[in-house]
Image (cartoon, rainbow, N blue to C red):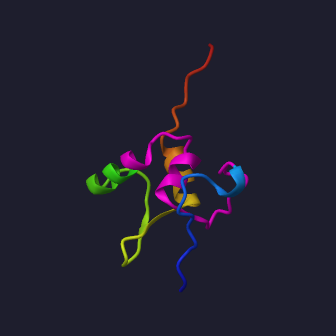
Amino acid sequence: MSQPRLSTGSQPAQGHALTPSSTPPSAALSPEQASAFLGGRPTPKTLANWRSRGIGPAYVKYGDGLVAYLVEDLEAFRRSRRVATGGAQ
């Protein structure tokens, strides 16, 4: 199995925003890209902190220390944080 190709920069190539509709579900994102995908919060540093504490979105860690987040895991994390309101009665 080959490793996913991750961008080393914090911005997507050529200024394209990372959004659920433009990113394939099986895409692997760097921590910087994962942060951008989630709207800039949590920051890459917060993601690293969460990884060390065993919380936050699921991630993939490769033998060489490379960390990647699958888009489907980021979307599941986002859904798990959803708060439903009662709405107007």
**Relative horizontal placement of residue 3, taking residue 21 as reference (left or right):** left
Residue at x-position 42% and y-position 70%: 66
- The x, y position of residue 29, in whole percent, is 55, 61
Give above or below for 83 relative to 54. Answer: above
Q: Main secondary structure of the magenta part?
A: loop
Residue farthest along the bottom direction in this orientation? 1
The verdict on residue 55 being magenta is: no
Residue farthest along the top direction in this orientation? 89
* Quarter of the image where one finds residue 42: top left
Residue at x-position 52% and y-position 58%: 73
Give the quadrant of the C terminus: top right
* Quarter of the image where one finds residue 65: bottom left
- The x, y position of residue 38, in whole percent, is 55, 45
Give above or below for 32 relative to 79. Answer: below
**Number of marks in picture:** 0
- The x, y position of residue 32, in whole percent, is 50, 53
The verdict on residue 36 being magenta is: yes
Residue at x-position 51% and y-position 48%: 35
Front residue of this view, candidates 89 and 28: 28
Residue at x-position 33% and y-position 56%: 51
Residue farthest along the left direction in this orientation? 53
* Quarter of the image where one finds residue 72: bottom right
Front residue of this view, candidates 4 and 88: 4
Give above or below for 41 relative to 34. Answer: above
Task: Give the magenta range.
Answer: 17-46
- The x, y position of residue 34, in whole percent, is 52, 53
